[in-house]
Amino acid sequence: MTTTRFVEKWVEEAAGLTDPSRTVWCDGSKAEYDGLIESMLRDGTVLSLNPRTYPNCYLHRSHPSDVARTEQLTFICTRAREDAGPTNNWMAPAEAKARLGELFRHSMRGRTMYVIPYLMGPAGSPMSRTGVMVTDSAYVVASMHTMTRVGDVALQHMRDPEDFVAGLHSLGDLSPERRFIMHFPEERLIWSIGSGYGGNALLGKKCHALRIASWQARQEGWMAEHMLILGLEDPDGQVTYLAAAMPSASGKTNLAMVVSKLPGYRVWTVGDDIAWIYVDPQGQLRAINPERGFFGVAPNTSPNTNPNGMAMVRANTIFTNVALTTANEPWWEGIDTEPPAGLIDWQGKPWQSGGAPAAHPNSRFTVPAGQCPSIAPNWEEPQGVPISGFIFGSRRARVVPLVFEAFDWTHGVFLGSAMGTETTAAITGQVGVVRRDPMAMIPFCGYNMADYFSHWLSIGSRLHNPPKIFRVNWFRKDADGRFLWPGYGDNVRVLKWIVERIRGTAAATETPIGYVPSPGAIELSGLDVAPSTLAAALHCDRDEWFEALDELRVFYEQFGPRLPAPIKQAHAHTARQFRA
Ligand code: GTP
Ligand code: SPV
Ligand code: MN
């Protein structure tokens, strides 16, 4: 393995602190993956699924208190508190290191320390970045194999001997009392202890590719976003690439690989969770997917809602916290089959009908992206794909219409900053409460969110032809609590309108919140949705918006003078439009 003195020195320090019984350098090979699986089968960390119907697929049951991201235990540790901003937990770097140093001391005693050099982004891309993480969890190593590019390829992409994000991870004792996820963006360093769960433990993902990367992106003039990337192919074969930010468990994976219900249209998948986006020399935004796999939500994935998702998890997949059938197959709520007799729940106990869900609501699958039937042929293109439009989507039972378009870049940044959403099982805590989640980045922005808004505004001024920005909401409900819009495959009808707006051909009506599709502009052929239901889904209620704008004003106030003036002005302008 080619490594650098700086990498070796950092690994030695990690071993000095955690005191593992041995250190293994990972090469990312299939033999290594198979060996990890074998050892996890032996110690019960994973169970084998039906080798005939789910070849090379495994079930992992996590500790019952370690099933989702824990935002209250996640910190940004910058020298100055204001640089983390009011929406992040902050701790002084020295204090964080003192407190976690105690927890990490000897934490790997009797365990193996795996060293994982990983690359975020396609091989050969100038956008790709290297990380080196150490961990005492074989499950984390196997997951990193699927989610990132592990081994020599990572070290070969270092631009200088110190060019890597360092990540120290230990399961510790898995107690939430002794769990912390710490980020030191000024040192490109991550310390995470006490959790084996996805976003807390696969350090390449949220910790590196979003929190540390967003800090670097601001310094270097690019963007690290919680966005899917897709290409919509129209009946003429023309592909338009869009990137969409949606909060956790709010539809990115599903939209990224959606099978169109509109004949002639087809969606190509580039990424389902994170986009790294840069301005090319022509002033065009281009995006790469820094990941190599999908860590997707299992519940409600079915042959009807997400056929590509169902097809891709039939091999080489690790399922976490799903239920198990007597045929040794995975099962979850919303898979579209009745719960079979003899079902075992996510904690390994016989499932009781009428009781708690059999699969944990945040149960997930980890699968190589290349297995997705709709994976774009150019998904690993080093230059990325050109982005023609941005979508901000969230979960709102009320207030927010199915789709509308921003007036311009600045107004679109305002709409992104104004996003609110109902919380989901992807984070520990209450589900279904509305919170502010600008650009779906509230848990992932590694610096002051007011500066993040400024960064978005400044990117716009560097663009030759800024992408149009759209707001969507698949989750609006009627008075009886039923979804107004069928969602899933029918969302392509909305994507079609979006692409036609980008090309200047679709009809829209100007309203105080933006351009809303004119009656008839959204294709409803072959769909059992009455025009009046669509009108209700698109309706903008004056009183609801007044209330929402007021909540937003309170949210903005916490940023004080750091909030960029154009955002404040867009907010004030919208409120005035409603009054007029
Ligand atoms: P993270 O991986 O947590 O970042 O989430 P994500 O944004 O990729 O969410 P995902 O696509 O996995 O969707 C989460 C949940 O929302 C699943 O239960 C989906 O079935 C559901 N969902 C996705 N799209 C739609 C839709 O169009 N309509 C409705 N009603 N539900 C949807
Ligand atoms: C999310 O919560 O937004 C996820 C899952 O994508 S995790 O990687 O666990 O953060
Ligand atoms: Mn996510």
Image (cartoon, rainbow, N blue to C red):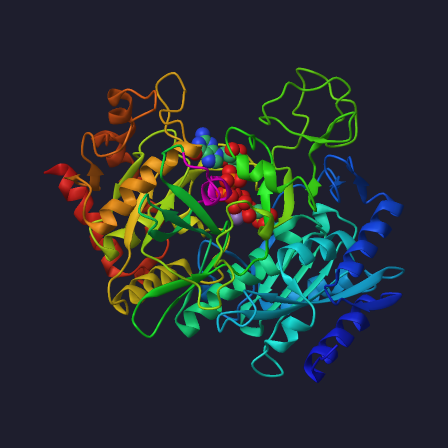
Residue 577 belongs to magenta span: no
Q: Position of residue 197 (x, y in %)?
A: 67, 48
**Magenta portion: prevailing SS class:** loop
Which residue sits at x=70%, y=37%? 321
Give the quarter of the figure containing the C terminus: top left
Using the image as rendered, state which of residue 441 and residue 145 is in the foreground. 145
Q: Nearer the viewer, residue 160 or 503?
A: 503
Specify whether 484 is left or right of 227: left
Residue 170 at what x, y percent from top left? 75, 58
Magenta highlight range: 246-260
Query: Which residue lies at the image location 64% right of the left edge and 18% below the top edge?
Result: 338
User: Image height check: is 559 above or below 303?
Assistant: below
Task: Work out whether residue 249 can be spotted.
Answer: no
311 horizontally vs 454: left or right: right
Q: Is residue 257 magenta?
A: yes
Is residue 81 toward the left or the right of residue 337 in the image? Answer: left
Q: Nearer the viewer, residue 578 or 349?
A: 349
Residue 49 visible in the displayed image: yes
Picture quarter containing residue 192?
bottom right
Indicate the position of residue 514 as horizontal and vertical percent values. 21, 43
Residue depicted at x 66% and y 23%: 356
Q: Residue furthest left?
A: 580
The vertical placement of 90 against 124, above or below, is above
Query: x%, y% of residue 427?
Result: 57, 42
Name the image quarter holding the N terminus. Answer: bottom right
Picture quadrant where residue 204 is located: bottom right
